[in-house]
Image (cartoon, rainbow, N blue to C red):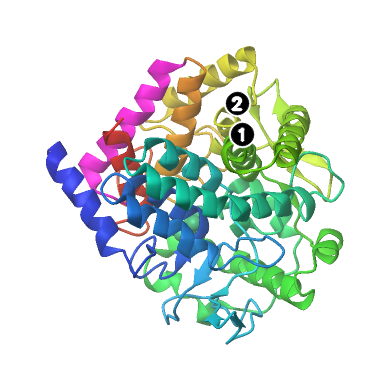
Amino acid sequence: MNKMNLEKQSKEILIKNDRGGYTVPTARLYPFQWNWDSGFTALGLVKFNEERAWQELEKLFEGQWQDGLLPHIIFHQSSPDYYPGPDLWGMPKDVYENDRLLPQTSGISQPPVLSTVVRMILEEANDKALAVVAAQGLYPRLLAWHRWWWRARDPENTGLSVVYHPWETGMDNSPAWDKALQRVEAVNNSGHKRRDLQQVNQAQRPSQMDYNRYMALVELFSSLKYEPEALYEQSTFKVIDLGVNSLLQRSNIDLLSLAQQFGSLEEQAEIEMRINLTRQAFQRLWSPELSIYLNWDCITNTPIEIPVAAGFLPLFARIPDEKQAKQMSYELSRWSDLCRYLVPSCSPDSADFEAKRYWRGPVWFIVNWMIGEGLEHYGQTALSEQIRQNSKELVELSGFFEYYDPQDSSGLGGGEFSWTAAIFLHWLSE
Ligand code: GLC
């Protein structure tokens, strides 16, 4: 298909997935507003409707909690197509704030990409007056969310924040979480209630046992009333996720730029301190043997020795030094010799690699965009360009899917997928 058609098609997908001020990731499988999805989606919306891009972000923050947490799902309206809904998260109904009905939400967060998105949209906006008002309005909410990550999720001030659920990493089914998840005691069969299997082939989705463990964690958090200290002490799943921490660090850098325009000197100093602390702390996640960063299991206090695509995301956060960045790009080139399309979500020669099961092998556009951007920053232009070309080819061959088989290019998961369309549009205009 030619470029014009694909451009038109990607805009149509974003318009079709619009539910009135927010965009669903895909029509049936994910019928609500998802946190990081909306961030990436805004990067596509801004290409043809700036007002709508800002609205996407404002709508998301309608679900922010008093303590700063920005939930991973905002249930603006109910849907029979999704499990677990708000009641399972233990969320009260009919809560009003200044006469406004608050949307129900989940009780965990997702990788924080929004400060980066706000800064990018602000800088490229044609309607500067609108952009400044919108960014200024979002800034205190972003700061509150970052502080929540720094404090509620890093109470010992180590520089790295923890997550309590695979869903919180956005890379739900990554093999990196297997061992940590196995320690979680499963609840009894939640299978009859799952909705995902009616829409996507079982071989591409998490197993039933995993689902029972996911639900055990949700029940635990709800029973602890999401109290930060209690979660930190009692969550049976606790990891330092490279995705969350890389996106948070990059977002810290971009939040600092927003603070220079809209914040106080104290806030700037606070953000700068956190950036320095995190940069240092990341060193313990570097593996010189594997030339990649590793996730960390906080219950056993050991690195998780499975090389996954998130191991390259510190490039997006400007964490590695020049030498490390070079080693990482050699490692990624090695992956590319082993499989046709970059970037597979797990090393292709790892025992855990599965080309079609989600987050265990498939290619994801959002991950490609972030790794590509990082490589470009470090001067690895050829590899970055290869990622972009591979991604475009996937769309040309298969359409706008949720994720793709890195060997045979088939499109998998949900179709007409918002973040794939949005990143495609973002790339097109670069
Ligand atoms: C899946 C993905 C997650 C994404 C959500 C909506 O759960 O793992 O990252 O946010 O779908 O697209």
Using the image, determine if residue 13 lies above or below residue 326. below
Where is the N terminus found, in terms of image quarters?
A: top left
As drawn, 427 above or below 65: above
Which residue is denoted by mark 2 in the rendering?
Answer: 318
Image quarter hosting the C terminus: top left
| Labelled pair 1, 2 in contact (Cβ < 8 Å) | yes
Can you give x and y, in whole percent of width and height, for residue 152 in the image?
78, 56
**Label 1 or label 2, whichever comes before in sequence order:** 1
Identify the element where label 1 is drawn. helix
What is the span of residues highlighted in magenta in the rendered image?
380-401
> Is residue 44 or residue 407 the one in the foreground?
44
- Which residue is painted at 65% across and 68% down in the image? 107
Q: Nearer the viewer, residue 299 or 124?
A: 124
**Residue 253: image tag:** 1
Residue 408 visible within the image? no
The residue shown at (37%, 36%) is 124
In the rendered image, residue 394 lying in the magenta stretch gets the answer: yes
